[in-house]
Image (cartoon, rainbow, N blue to C red):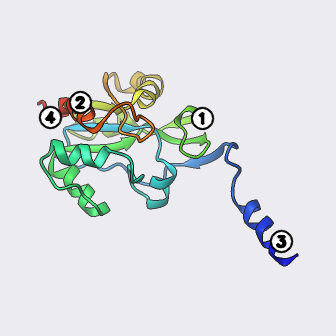
Amino acid sequence: MENRNAEEKKKEKKPEAHIPESVVHEFPPVWDGNSRILILGTFPSVKSREQHFYYGHPQNRFWKVMAALTKSETPETIEEKKRLLLKNGIAVWDVIASCEIVGSSDSSIRNVKANDIAGLLKKSRIRTVYANGGTAYRLYQKFCFPYTGREAVCLPSTSPANAAWTLPKLLEAWKIIQKP
């Protein structure tokens, strides 16, 4: 009887896999005065939220793509990741400040409140905005473009859910971020 009660309590604390959860983005953008490009995701995955940093899922190819394009070692720690981005003039943030979401599923996102992308662009030297995937692009167009007036370039998602895009194909598409 005691074991069953412990099991039931565990289940009670865990949100149902199909029930949307209201979540707030809890970590700041990575940028500095040398940032020239901004790469926008949609909203942090569960793994990223646990780590309090971008692209935390071990199967996400974002850090491998960044390392290859900048001819760097693939960063492991948050500090190494920040250093790689800032050294190469790359800013990273997400379109969404808060929303309702089921796990990490972009397709489940509802009740979006956007981050102040226009404010970041005004106080920085960022010239080009890239969206990491179609959902980030659509959300940017809907919630941010009216305030920024700056077109975004849609790149294929580095997410493991985008399995049709191999690492070599991603590198070919993403090399556009290297252009001045």
Element type where label 2 sits in the image: strand
- Which amino acid lies under the numbered mark 4 shown in the image of this protein? Gln
Q: Position of residue 48 (x, y in %)?
A: 45, 53
Query: Looking at this rendering, what residue extends furthest in the bottom direction?
Result: 2
Residues marked 1 and 4 touching at CB (< 8 Å): no
The mark nearer the N terminus, 2 or 3, is 3
User: Residue at 48% across / 39% down in the picture?
Assistant: 96
Distance (Cα) linking label 2 and label 4: 11 Å
| Pointer 1 residue | 108
- Which amino acid lies under the numbered mark 2 shown in the image of this protein? Thr
Q: Looking at the image, is mark 2 or mark 4 nearer the viewer?
A: 4
Q: Residues within 10 Å of mark 2 (few under 14, many from 20)?
A: some
Element type where label 1 sits in the image: helix
| Pointer 3 residue | 5
In this orientation, does residue 33 appear?
no
Q: Looking at the image, is mark 3 or mark 1 nearer the viewer?
A: 3
